[in-house]
Image: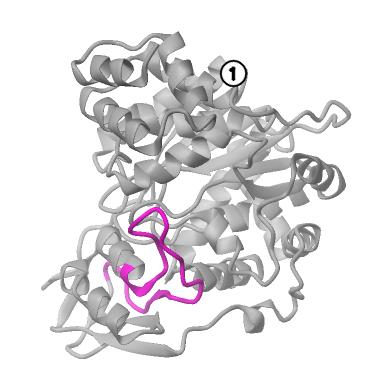
Amino acid sequence: MRAVDIIRKKRDGQENTREEIQFLIQRHLDSVVPDYQIAAWLMAAFIRGLSDNEMSALTRAMVESGKTVQLPSMTLVKVDKHSTGGVGDKTSLVVAPIVAAAGVVVPMISGRALGHTGGTLDKLEAIPGFRTDLSLEEFQAALREYGLALIGQTAELNPADRRLYALRDATATVESIPLIVASIISKKAVEGIDALVLDVKTGYGAFIQEQGASRQLALRLINAAQEFGIRAAAVLSDMSQPLGNAVGNSLEVAEAVRTLQGKGPEDLVELSLEIAGLMLVLGGAAESHDAGKELARRKMETGVALEKFADLLFSQGSVADIRRLLDELPRSRHVYEYGSPREGYLAECRADQIGWASVALGAGRDRKEAKINAAAGIELLKKRGAPVREGDALALLHYDEAGALERALGFLPAAFEFSETPPPPRPLVQEILGC
């Protein structure tokens, strides 16, 4: 069996067998099949698509590329959440401690920045000393002791997805439903979880922008999870504009902490409670979604969830004190105020353009090996529906280099759209599936 024959077969629109996909993934991990051949197969899969059988084979090959978390001594239900990628989406940092504070175990294997969207691991690594590279034994110990842990793919847990994830980002093969499903579910299957809540994004800033296609993705994710014995539900949420006001790693950590302190922006609080409520239902801590949302709100408002976030910092090596964390996060050397070019109402605050502007500032990656500036990013001062006058500050850009600012400013004219009258309301949560 040769990699080039498998690539040619997919390129020509034929279906790869389970054995061929297993061969490709395993030989890539063994450094026999190089990056450029995997990239070629990913592009062929992106263009030609993958059948359900191919998607299932790819998911299993990725799961079998490493070990699986085993927690036989834990009787508590284990529930995770996953977002399909958004701009300003820091819900994992809010939801995980809320749900763990209610007695549900939250094992979470997260990803890094992909295209114009942020990554949970990059956000966490903005916290001084925070380790996302726990060994399997350390991951299991943290879950037993504190009820939550947030890590990345490791050499032990799904190493195949870690490598394919970076290649997809660098080869413009992200927006493929089968590849997205395989990546997400393979990460979740190795966690040993009982249930999963999926936050499937739709709109300008989502990888899948049409609501119908996003709904299709949500249903395929739910079905794929069930193949591995994982109960699943999905929230379809709007990503036409960034979630919250902060975009960029250090800025988003600060906003997540303020949210756990009861001071978060309305949209971030709303979506976090929706997701946490579903997780608490699937985890057996609440009888209904409404009851789950109310329990989640209490855990946040009483400060118990913030204490659990402090446990997370301690268990994963951070030297930061939760009481001083906001002062200890990295800060950029410069802040630029971007003003409104006209008067009216903000009709759109496009998440995709804001995301690319944030990448240009250094908060994301435009190539596999790019370094991230943890302090860079954008603070939105106005969002969709806000009345503005000419010259009003719309956003603050945090940056270190003049060249980064110049590149970022090129995206902002297309990010903000204006109208003479207020735009019609757009619901944040569009649909809940599977629960």
Between 207 and 131, the one nearer to me in the picture: 131
Q: Position of residue 377 (x, y in %)?
A: 41, 74
The answer to whether residue 100 is above or below residue 77 is: below
Q: Nearer the viewer, residue 351 or 389?
A: 351
| Residue 287 shows up from this direction | no
Q: Main secondary structure of the magenta part?
A: loop
Quarter of the picture holding the C terminus: top right
The image quarter containing residue 253 is bottom right
Q: Where is 325 relative to 105, above or below?
A: below
72 left or right, relative to 20: right
Q: Secondary structure at mark 1?
A: loop
The residue at the point 56 percent across, 55 percent down is: 121
Measured from the top left, where is residue 158 in percent x and y? 59, 33
Identify which residue is drawn at 74% across, 67% down.
Answer: 318
Q: Is residue 394 found left or right of 120 in the rendered image?
A: left
- Determine the residue positioned at 10% across, 73% down: 420
Circle 1 residues within 10 Å: few <14, some 14–19, many ≥20: some
The image shows residue 161, relative to residue 332, as above or below, that is above
Kindly identify which residue carries mark 1.
Answer: 228
Q: Amino acid at mark 1?
A: Phe
Q: Residue shown at 22%/22% (left/top)?
A: 48
Chain part drawn in magenta? 360-385
Where is the N terminus found, in terms of image quarters?
top left
Where is residue 310? Give x, y as percent. 76, 65
